Image (tube, helix red, strand yellow):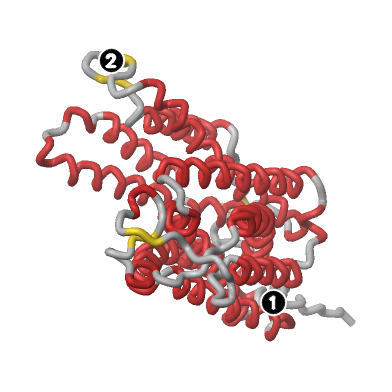
Amino acid sequence: MCVGYLLMLLSNCLFLLADHVPAETSAFYIMLCRFLGGLGMGNTSTLRTTLTAHSMSDDRAKAMSVFIGGRALGLILGPGLQLIFLFLGDTGLQLIGPLHIHSHNAAAFISIVLNISAIVALFTVYHEIERNGNSCSQRSVEDDENWPRPDKLAMFVCMLTRYCQNFTYYAIETLAPAFMMMMFNMERDSAVGTMSIIFFIAGVFALSLYSTFVFTDVARKLNIGKVNTISLIIFIIYVLTTYQWPYIPTNVVVNTDGTHGGCDYSLYSWCLGLPKTSQAFFYIGYIIAFGGCVPFINVGDATLYSKLFNPVGQALEQSLYDVSQVFARVVAPVLCTAIYASFGPQRVWELLFAQLVVVTALWIAFAHRMIPLRPKPRPVFYLE
């Protein structure tokens, strides 16, 4: 965990110095900064592994809520702080010598403070629990002997659920500004501002649910299978209600200059006759689906996944679980943007619908296998 935070600290420190890098090497320099930051962010698997080893099965959902809720808080505060940093302007404030903090690098400065705080917390607040001389997060041969083999199908369904949920989120997040400009005939600034408000409301809604999970026993009492299935069905309803159905009487505004709203027919041949989605359904549905359902899926899916294995030493399994999210984050923006440009939003919505239906069907069909793993009963010997 310390190595992960040190890599992120190095990434942000280098980013602060980007103003003094020659222009011809700036692109490579920024990519190096982001690459180091990405390596550091890989410690989420280690964090989840440690969290699993240090929590009891009954408290696992609450522990996951703390972890995931912390990330949600960062996602909410990050864009909000960036709006505040805009007031610093391009010159900003002098820090040390030629080093200035301005609107473009202030976020990196705050991140440096947070990274240092996390490292200090690791050495002052965090205490590794030991068992038989070994770290509680390290698996031993005895641990493996006491636990049966995990259900790989249940493991796959949990990973696929995480992939599908994140794929839907990143697809809509990527397309939202262009989609709103085209569908609702909005200026770019208006579309970006409106979606930022929707993201913020959904984020506050999600954070309030995470807080409820942390400070109450709601998470412990959840039926994970039913909650995940219902949440996925709500996602399907959201996709269906915002789909461009052919019976909708109103079509999008078509023009030859989409920079100020409307659908640019000179770029997209699919503009003609494209039905217009309900604006209210798009906004309200997003808040309900991503603000209200995502916390249940995140906590429920991560909790169940952590219970499919021996709770000690899940580094490999948790890394695979993170890969499913990272894969969605890489694939969704590229694939959905390409489909949107070539075939229009209807094909993107159909792809999202198909994925959600498949995952929901798996939860329903294999509900009897989506259960926590139990240790083998220890043999009992009687002395005569």
CA distance separating discs 1 and 2: 56 Å
Tell me the amino acid under the disc marked 2. Ile
Picture quarter containing residue 289?
bottom right
Where 193 sits versus 97, above or below? Answer: below
Mark 1, other Cα within 10 Å: few <14 / some 14–19 / many ≥20: many
- Outermost residue toward the right in this view: 384
Front-most of residues 1 and 361: 361
Tell me the amino acid under the disc marked 1. Met
* Residue 64 image point, x, y percent: 65, 53
* Residue 180 image point, x, y percent: 47, 54
Question: In the picture, which quadrant includes the C terminus?
Answer: bottom right
* Residue 150 in view here: no
On residue 370, which mark appears?
Answer: 1
Mark 2, other Cα within 10 Å: few <14 / some 14–19 / many ≥20: few
Q: Secondary structure at mark 1?
A: loop
Residue lying at 47% horizontally and 46% vertically, measured from the top left: 191
Residue lying at 52% horizontally and 47% vertically, measured from the top left: 195
Labelled pair 1, 2 in contact (Cβ < 8 Å) = no
Q: Earlier in the sequence, mark 1 or mark 2?
A: 2
In-image side of 160 versus 217 (left or right): left
In-image side of 351 versus 312 (left or right): left
Front-most of residues 161 and 122: 161
* Residue under pointer 2: 96
* Residue 359 in view here: yes
Front-most of residues 251 and 372: 251
